[in-house]
Image (cartoon, rainbow, N blue to C red):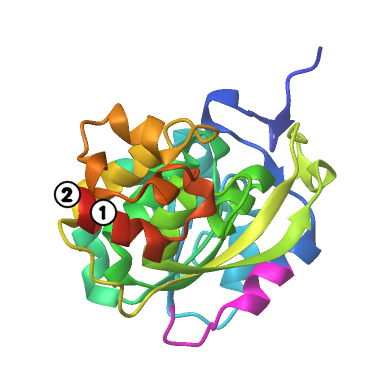
Amino acid sequence: MSIPRSQGIVLKKKHGQNFLRDESIVFAMLDRVMLTHTTSVFEIGPGDGFLTQHILNSPIARLWTFEIDPEWAVHIRKRFEGNTHLTVFDANILDVDFTMFEQHKPWVLLANLPYHVTFPILHLLKEHRALLAEGVIMVQEEVAQKIVKKGGRDFGFVSLYFQHYFEWQLLVKVSPSAFYPPPKVFSRLLYFKPRQTCDVIPDEQNFWHFVRQCFRQPRRTLKNNLSQGHYHVAAVPEELLALRAQQIDKKGLLAIWDMVR
């Protein structure tokens, strides 16, 4: 069995290195965001620079790339040597001190995210959303659908949590054949924009713990899930306790939260 390589460099499965090879997907990313000569852009995991090249061909003020693999960081520096818009960081984005982004905010994110760290990166973006203008990310199709769900099957904590902080839009569905090496799953471009104002949630941190408990076992009723979490379920009408969390929107869960907290 041959080992996948690009530019003579072995691709490392541990870093989720599936490199985009379809220019139409890149154009779909670039067309969805506003890029001007004053725009600051950052990219996570540039790899061999397929997306990087197209970003640098766009009217931008600067592009910062964050590459965890030292071999690819060296490659990117050599490939785009002399390009004054580009700064390459040998860094895991999860370890970066985001205060460095303050100077040139707001930022646009364009990235084909490594699938195994999608949620840690999403939580990172949530924590630093004040630094962001908008972005387009590539994620697994299954993950994209969960994020945008408004109810029913696959609707859950992930949907409620990330919709609270961001606006989302499904873009192009991406076949495995658009990558080298091809992954075993379909992907999806996902547009996001931080919400200017978020709903006020009393005791917000504990509310999200409550929501997790509500969806702990999605097929079970609220009564069964909440009774395992030591909540005061007696304050909730029986007709609500008989529902599954997937049958209730955020407004309804907030109302129940007011009853049990």
Badge 2 crowding class, 10 Å Cα cut-off, few under 14, some 14 to 19, many 20 or more, is some
- Report if the CB atoms under discs 2 and 1 are less than 8 Å apart: yes
Q: Residue at x 47, y 46 (%)?
A: 245
Q: Nearer the viewer, residue 213 or 63?
A: 213
Outermost right residue: 177
Q: What element does badge 2 sit on?
A: loop
Q: In the displayed structure, does residue 246 sit left or right of residue 180? A: left
Q: Residue at x 73, y 26 (%)?
A: 4
Q: Nearer the viewer, residue 127 or 103?
A: 127
Measure the C-alpha gap from mark 2 to mark 1.
Answer: 6 Å
Q: Position of residue 203 (x, y in %)?
A: 15, 56
Q: Give, as a three-letter code, the residue at label 1.
A: Trp
Q: Position of residue 218 (x, y in %)?
A: 51, 36
- Which of the 4 image quarters holds residue 8? top right
Q: Position of residue 150 (x, y in %)?
A: 56, 61
Q: Give, as a three-letter code, the residue at label 2.
A: Arg
- Position above or below: 75 against 14: below
Q: Nearer the viewer, residue 81 or 179?
A: 179
- Position above or below: 93 against 190: above
Q: Please tell me whether residue 197 belongs to the stretch shown in magenta.
A: no
Q: What element does badge 1 sit on?
A: helix
- Residue 157 appears in view: yes
Q: Give the residue number, with chain letter if any, for mark 2.
A: 261
Badge 1 crowding class, 10 Å Cα cut-off, few under 14, some 14 to 19, many 20 or more, is many
Q: Residue at x 47, y 87 (%)?
A: 37
- Which of the 4 image quarters holds residue 256? bottom left
Q: Please tell me whether residue 37 belongs to the stretch shown in magenta.
A: yes
- Position above or below: 55 against 45: below
Q: Give the residue number, with chain letter if any, for mark 1.
A: 257
- Residue 91 appears in view: no
Q: Which residues are magenta?
A: 27-39
Q: Position of residue 186 (x, y in %)?
A: 75, 43
